[in-house]
């Protein structure tokens, strides 16, 4: 019997297991996926469209490359229409279906114990952390936390988001930050390779602006790292301390995004203490960055400038032959000092530090993410924008913004910050519509950067208060979406 166009597409199980299919899903390349469906499932454009809730013309434009799918809603329709299995949906950055979610959450913890960290999860629950390009979704976030086997504290934290979208539950950090020594040591030997992978995952997740996810990972990860620092000896202990410094750095960074300065201070202090124990100059320099940030957040701009400058000089003295990593940390410290000087309204000092950072960026040659700094010439330009905004020089900020090549910015958090700073500059300039468009670009790129940051919500509220009638309805809708007061 001949197949009808309304018949469901029967996708071979083997198709979802193909490496080229996995690559297409991870890169969210629906053009490539549809061509694979036609090749291995015999699916026509019309049948793909019917299954996925798309017109045949839209499927044709996707397959020809003239249209690219970018919205989460369409990805969900495609995944549901094709009956993607859980591993395919996760590769695409989506939560499992409702049925799969029910099955996953119905599985009790082994031996009645609390779930363990992702690297300890057995069999089918072992999943990879998502690629940084994947978009955030509340359902996917909660489901992924469960599937990855995060701690119960982390699962509660991931679910605790109020209607305004503000991340709550920072209290989940308290146990790990305040009383790490009271947690009994595990009976397992510390697995440094897996701890290294977990810290790198936390760094990537933060730089992807998936703050809820990284917060769900950190409480137990910090305790595991403390256990490793306490139980290991020799070079292994030094390495564990360096990893711990990086993890506390991430914790402090997220808490600063949330304006939770008290816990952020504690995390920054623990980062510096762990870095000092690691005896690694680069670890110390990296932790000095977050200490500087915490000082700035608390209004100690002069102290922040001094700390950044002194630790940059110390690093330069200790590393006689600069490497890409040392140049990146050195330059990033100078950039942090430049921001602090600008907040202290020290225009000359800020300019001097920016120029010195620019020289380091030129020596590096391009933008890289060495030691998770995202440092390079383009990042220096982003900081010039931020400094100009802080100094109230909107015209200079916009001029700098016009020089930015987004293709050179590989870290989502940096791109999102660029759009927010640009919106701030347009706001100072009285260009409300352009400020709104910049914020929309940031939202498309990193929803949690806008929904979780009080500073961004304050900017939207200020814009709404002075917006002309033509822009006010759009800003009002936007403010409601991100939970900004109206």
Image (spheres, helix red, strand yellow):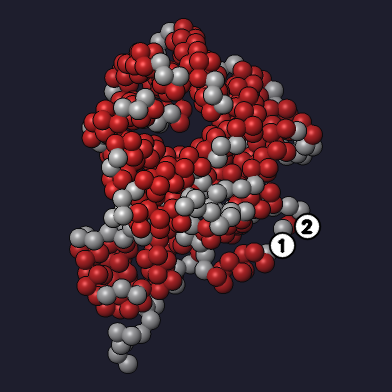
Please name the residue shown 25% across and 64% down the image. Answer: 62
Q: Is residue 426 above or below residue 336?
A: below
Question: In the rendered image, which residue does mark 2 sit on?
Answer: 112
Question: In the rendered image, which residue does mark 1 sit on?
Answer: 108
Q: CA distance from mark 2 to mark 1?
A: 7 Å
- Nearest to the observer: residue 156 or residue 193: 156
Please name the residue shown 73% across and 57% down the image. Answer: 110
Please name the residue shown 48% across and 50% down the image. Answer: 484
Give the quadrant of the N terminus.
bottom left
- Nearest to the observer: residue 195 or residue 130: 130
Residue 404 in the image, given as x and y percentages of width and height? 26, 34
256 displayed left or right of 423: right
231 displayed left or right of 218: right
Residue 368 in the image, given as x and y percentages of width and height? 36, 30
Residue 20 in sight here: no
Circle 1 SS class? loop
Q: Are marks 2 and 1 in contact (CB under 8 Å)?
A: yes
Query: How many other residues sit within 10 Å of disc 2, few (<14), some (14-19) or many (≥20)?
Result: few
Q: Is residue 479 above or below residue 357?
A: below
- Nearest to the observer: residue 94 or residue 261: 261
Residue 464 in sight here: yes
Residue 420 in the image, given as x and y percentages of width and height? 38, 40
Residue 249 in the image, given as x and y percentages of width and height? 56, 30
């Amino acid at each position: 019997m001949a197949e009808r166009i309304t018949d469901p597409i029967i996708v071979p199980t083997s198709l979802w297991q193909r490496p080229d299919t996995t690559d297409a899903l991870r890169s969210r390349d629906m053009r490539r996926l549809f061509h694979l469906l036609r090749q291995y499932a015999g699916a026509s454009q019309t049948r793909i469209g019917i299954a996925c809730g798309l017109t045949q013309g839209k499927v044709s434009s996707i397959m020809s490359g003239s249209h690219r799918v970018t919205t989460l809603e369409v990805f969900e329709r495609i995944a549901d229409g094709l009956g993607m299995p859980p591993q395919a949906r996760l590769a695409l950055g989506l939560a499992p279906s409702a049925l799969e979610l029910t099955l996953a959450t119905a599985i009790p913890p082994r031996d009645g114990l609390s779930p363990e960290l992702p690297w300890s999860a057995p069999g089918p629950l072992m999943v990879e952390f998502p690629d940084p390009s994947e978009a955030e979704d509340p359902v996917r976030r909660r489901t992924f936390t469960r599937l990855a086997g995060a701690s119960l504290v982390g699962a509660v934290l991931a679910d605790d988001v109020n209607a305004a979208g503000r991340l709550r539950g920072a209290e989940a950090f308290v146990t790990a930050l305040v009383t790490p020594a009271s947690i009994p040591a595990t009976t397992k030997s510390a697995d440094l390779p897996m701890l290294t992978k977990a810290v790198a995952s936390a760094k990537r997740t933060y730089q992807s602006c998936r703050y809820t996810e990284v917060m769900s990972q950190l409480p137990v990860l910090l305790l595991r790292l403390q256990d490793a620092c306490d139980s290991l000896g020799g070079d292994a202990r030094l390495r564990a301390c360096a990893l711990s410094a990086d993890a506390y750095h991430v914790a402090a960074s997220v808490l600063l995004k949330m304006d939770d300065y008290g816990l952020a201070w504690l995390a920054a202090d623990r980062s510096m203490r762990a870095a000092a124990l690691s005896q690694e100059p680069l670890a110390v320099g990296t932790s000095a960055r977050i200490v500087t940030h915490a000082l700035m957040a608390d209004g100690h701009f002069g102290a922040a400038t001094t700390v950044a400058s002194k630790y940059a000089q110390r690093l330069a003295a200790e590393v006689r032959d600069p490497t890409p990593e040392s140049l990146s940390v050195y330059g990033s410290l100078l950039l942090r000092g430049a921001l602090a000087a600008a907040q202290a309204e020290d225009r000359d000092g800020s300019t001097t530090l920016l120029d010195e950072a620019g020289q380091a960026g030129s020596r590096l040659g391009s933008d890289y993410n060495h030691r998770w700094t995202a440092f390079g010439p383009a990042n220096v330009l982003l900081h010039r924008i931020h400094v100009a905004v802080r100094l109230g020089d909107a015209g200079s900020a916009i001029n700098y913004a016009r020089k930015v090549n987004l293709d050179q910015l590989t870290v989502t958090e940096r791109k999102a910050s660029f759009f927010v700073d640009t919106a701030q500059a347009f706001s100072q300039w009285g260009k409300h519509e352009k400020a709104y468009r910049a914020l929309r670009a940031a939202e498309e790129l990193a929803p949690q950067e806008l929904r979780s940051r009080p500073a961004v919500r304050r900017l939207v509220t200020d814009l709404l208060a002075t917006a002309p009638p033509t822009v006010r309805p759009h800003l009002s809708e936007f403010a409601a979406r991100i939970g900004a007061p109206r």
